[in-house]
Amino acid sequence: MVVRVQNYIDGHWKASRAGEYLGVYNPATAEKLGEVPLSPPEEVDEAAQAAQRALKGWRETPAGDRIQYLFRLKYLLEENFEDLSRTITMECGKTIVESRGEMRRAIENVEVASGIPSLIQGKFSEDIAPGIDEYFIRQPVGVVAIICPFNFPGMIPFWFMPYALACGNTVIVKPSEKVPLTMQKIFALMEQCGFPQGVVNLVNGAKETVDAILDHPLIRAISMVGSTPVARYIYARAAANGKRAQCQGGAKNISVVLPDADLETSTKVLADSAFGSAGQRCLATSIVAPVGEIQRDFVEAICEIARNRVVGYGLDEGVEMGPVITPQSKARIEGLIGKALEEDATILVDGRGAVIKGYEKGNFVRPTVILNIPPQGELFRTEIFGPVLSIMPVNTIEEAIELVNMGEYGNMACLFTKSGEAARKFRYHVQAGNVGINIGVAAPMAYFPFSGWKESFFGDLHGQGMDAVEFFTQKKVVIERWPKEWSRKF
Ligand code: NAD
């Protein structure tokens, strides 16, 4: 069945009046799953107006009552966990195990945001001067919009949405046009939660829809996750329009393996990091720098895992890696693998031209390992966003740290070692916002900020946890004096 994706505005499902719809395809089977509207600016306006109308009532709803909707949402997400996970696999391509992991992290954010009655508390200082007190309270920002990428259709909206709602804001979500189906299902559950009309809104579309969001005067804050050029553009345009913005961008993550690392664990963990979700994670390791004598054994072991990874349709039993999102992505990734030869690197395991029996039309690229890419080349700089791992051997931990810090991005850096001293040095010096020590995907739990640095992030407050609470509230500082002589005597 081909789903005609709808918008959810002011408490109602609405067919878009868009002149153009895009196809939504299962990346493993090429089956058409749906059609997504490129919603025009008028529909963004309808959503913004509805959200603005809902703001007063929602903001005046006590925090303890607001989170009752989140408790209901958590319950419904748990009840529909398997269906949502299957939908993610079908539209996005990752394995069912990965999709379940994604939904678990989404729910974790609902749980953390449910603590808002304590998280939103302000501070109070008595007697800042004789008889004068000062305090601040946190109040909602207003109507906020969330613009999402394709690679986590279930989780990424939840880095922001539960916090925004719990803090008393009203919300517009714009999913990726490549994977709009998961949010159709989640909004059907949100409808069942009974949120008051206009508190949560869903508008589908692509650039034109985003631009209408960025320019809309009623929308006060923008949370966005996507590629670096788009994140930078959205941050700049939102800021130029006087909005607060947090935009998480792309990545090129380097992991370092020291000679004392446990070879078996580190290769297994790094293979999962590089090839999990077909490398389409902003926390995928895309370069490993083995230090000194471990290089030969590491290369041998990782190539062995890469060759044997079971690639196929994520809903099938035993599949360890799914396809990439579109035929264009596959062509782009294969083109970049081809660049290795121009850059005098060696392709040790070549994943190009993959054909999976029964899924011949799928966008499959098998795990690929490339040795010795040059630090001044295109492969070092470019986010490949596919199952491609490059290896750049170095001689010392200092050289490895220098390599990590040469990159333009700063999303994640990981170290594998048994040495606490080395771990401390690495943690201290690397210019990356998420650091893993003997961890391959350093994805912060919901109560920590998702902390990209450099070209991986534009803004100051990140998604998740207390950063999200700060982003979705504005502080009001009050200084109070109540002179004795003004009061009646009781
Ligand atoms: P993308 O930048 O193509 O799209 C992201 C969103 O922006 C989508 O909703 C899209 O409709 C919109 N968009 C795209 N082009 C636009 C334009 N020119 N003007 C206005 N809006 C536009 O990203 P993607 O391909 O969907 O997602 C993959 C990227 O996201 C990768 O670079 C990945 O590293 C990054 N990512 C980052 C994080 C993080 O936390 N840093 C997490 C997940 C994904």
Image (spheres, grey):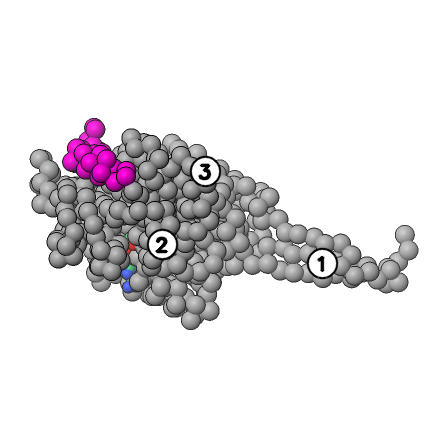
To which residue does mark 3 refer? 420
Nearer to the camera, 14 or 116 = 116
The location of residue 192, given as percent across then percent down, is: 41, 40
**CB at mark 3 closer than 8 A to ligand 1?**
no
Going by the image, does 71 lie left or right of 100?
right
| Nearest-to-viewer mark from 2 and 1 | 2
- Between the C-alphas of marks 2 and 1, the distance is 47 Å
Magenta highlight range = 293-321
Name above or below for residue 51 compared with residue 299.
below
| Amino acid identity at mark 3 | Gly
Name above or below for residue 399 compared with residue 458.
above
Query: Residue 294 is drawn in which quadrant?
Result: top left
The location of residue 200, given as percent across then percent down, is: 43, 51
Which residue: 31% across, 62% down? 230
Element type at marker 2? helix
To which residue does mark 1 refer? 134
| Nearest-to-viewer mark from 3 and 1 | 3
| Amino acid identity at mark 1 | Glu
Element type at marker 1? strand
- Would you say the residues marked 3 and 2 are in contact, meaning their CB atoms lie under 8 Å apart? no
Which residue: 22% across, 59% down? 377
Q: Which residue occupies the extreme top position in the image?
A: 317
Tell me which label, 3 or 2, sits earlier in the chain.
Answer: 2
- Between the C-alphas of marks 3 and 1, the distance is 44 Å
The location of residue 367, given as percent across then percent down, is: 18, 41
| Amino acid identity at mark 2 | Glu
Query: Residue 29 is drawn in which quadrant?
Result: top left
Picture quadrant of ligand 1: bottom left
Name above or below for residue 221 compared with residue 180.
below
Tell me which label, 2 or 1, sits earlier in the chain.
Answer: 1
To which residue does mark 2 refer? 402
